[in-house]
Amino acid sequence: MTQSLARSLHLICVITILSAAVAAGQAQVPVIPGVPDAARNAADSIDPEKIRAHVRFLASDLLEGRGPGLRGGQLAAEYIATQFALDGLKPAGDNGTYFQKVPLYAVHTVEDQTTASFVPQNGQPIPLTYSEDYVTKDQTGTASAEIDAPIVFVGYGIDAPEYHWNDYAGVDVKGKVLLVIVNEPPSTDESFFKGKTMTYYGRWTYKYEEASRKGALGVLIIHREDLASYPWHVVRDSQAIEKSYLQGDPTATLQAASWIQHDVAQKLLTAAGLGNVDAVIDSAGKRGFHAVELPVRFKAHIASKVRHYESDNVIGEVPGAQSGQAVLYSAHYDHLGIDPDAKGDQIYNGAADNGTGCGILLELARAFSETKPPHSIYFASVTAEEQGLLGSQWLGMHPPVPASQITLDLNYDMLNPIGIPTATELGGAERTTFYPEVEKTAKAFNLAIEPDQFPGAGHYYRSDHFSFARVGIPAFSIGQGTTFEGHPPEWGKQQMEDFTAHRYHQPSDEYRPDMDFRGDAKMAQFGFILGWEASSLTHTIGWQPGDEFEAARKKGN
């Protein structure tokens, strides 16, 4: 055979292989310095059709919306554990199993038996209508609670020593009900509540937690749409179903964890003689604010249905060549279950949210199982994310190895299967010392890194990576950006807006045969390489100096 003919045959083979890969819809993983061929080949094997198969099953009606602690959720956990076993992953849950038991209790407010009112010192009581004026949950898990307590206005309800800000200074709130503003003091200064980017102090979950730490009996969060970043119906609808809590959680002790409408807050402040609610909000965001007890009491009877249950995190390990510096991949498998009172379709299938993240996690586990990574790689499909990141919170408190030995968490949550993205959103990655590698790898994958489009909405604190960040583990989610191959720049944003309006947290989030999982596969490959690079480092990844999670990381080391 002549040298020329050999070259021609080699070229034909290369073209054939590439054509087959393109026909299969698989992107080619780029050559990246430091990433061995074995890792690239494993990443190349990630198959969009395998991801599709997982999503199709997990989003089927058979799984009844994957409600935590219910039959559908248990079926999903068993399916994920079976896939881990088929791929040869080592069990990393409780007692040599893939399952980590998460103890929970669920509270459902009985609306027609629950009453509330504001009772001024002078004047007539102001009755409140459930769902129209307020919503509430009794976090203590008792069937009935009677409340008659003073109301204390504590502004944003924040105690942040690093910003020299304490809304609780000089006031005793034990046994009282707190009136609190959602979000945090407005700022354009990066050294003061991170400017326009929301910190955790702005999240409603923090308001409840801090109030519990201070010994309060209840909280009334004032809803104003621009500050919350979502309309009242989002609050109302999320409270219409049961809410779960971790058993023994010391920050879930409120008898009335509540929201009130903006107009209702105005009625309250008028009765208290404090004037315009928006003026009061503006004043509370400036230095010099002092909490004040109002001449009004909150009186309520809260009736609840309570169930105690367990749900499972599912955890597997691909052992590494060395100990320490483990990488964790995470994705929640739970969704909203069944709404028996809904008309028509009652099953919240959760195909995109988060069947896609689970499908990616399972395909990553299969791909990694064909390699020997430098350090161990853990895969955790967690429960009760929709209930407030509870499964990942439990896992963060009880990790398979100490948090100090986990160098990075990469999370996947709701990657809409609509095609191949040319951009990625990695909110929080820039807060870690790993970001230079992230930038380099994204460039190799031809992925532009898009900034958070809504920094004031606090998206970083709404997905499971946050639970790991709280215990010091550098963590972020890998998401698609808004630009896609073969479409104009605005198309991706339009698709997301349409999904949010018509399918997000609705029974219509169902699997469809026309879904295009090539983009999910690309984001899985991108995450595979990032995880391999993190596992290959000679040092543990940290947070950037001054980050809010830096102290937790240093405490764990």
Image (tube, rainbow, N blue to C red):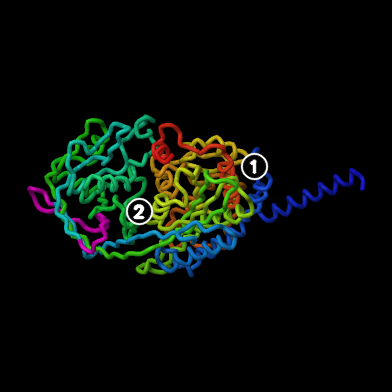
Say which quadrant the C terminus sits in.
top left
Q: Residue at x 50, y 38 (%)?
A: 541
Residue 196: x %, y % from top left: 38, 35
The tag on residue 112 is none
Left or right relative to 192: residue 121: left
Q: Which of 303 and 160 is in front in this view?
A: 160
Residue 161: x %, y % from top left: 30, 34
Left or right relative to 497: residue 160: left
Residue 482: x %, y % from top left: 53, 45
Q: Tell me, yes or no, if residue 57 can be seen here.
A: yes
Asked if the residues shown at circle 1 and circle 2 are in contact, with their CB atoms under 8 angstroms apart, the answer is no
Q: Mark 2 points at which residue?
A: 234
Q: What residue type is labelled 2?
A: Val
Q: Name the residue under label 1.
A: 35
Q: Residue at x 64, y 39 (%)?
A: 34
Determine if the magenta segment contains residue 298: no
Q: What residue type is labelled 1?
A: Val
**Dot 1 or dot 2, earlier in sequence:** 1
Q: What stretch is highlighted in magenta?
A: 119-144
Which image quadrant is residue 436 in? top right
Crowdedness near tag 1: few (<14), some (14–19) or many (≥20) residues, C-alpha within 10 Å: some
Q: Which residue lies furthest to the left in this view?
A: 122
> From what the image shows, is residue 355 above or below residue 403?
below
Element on which disc 2 rests: helix
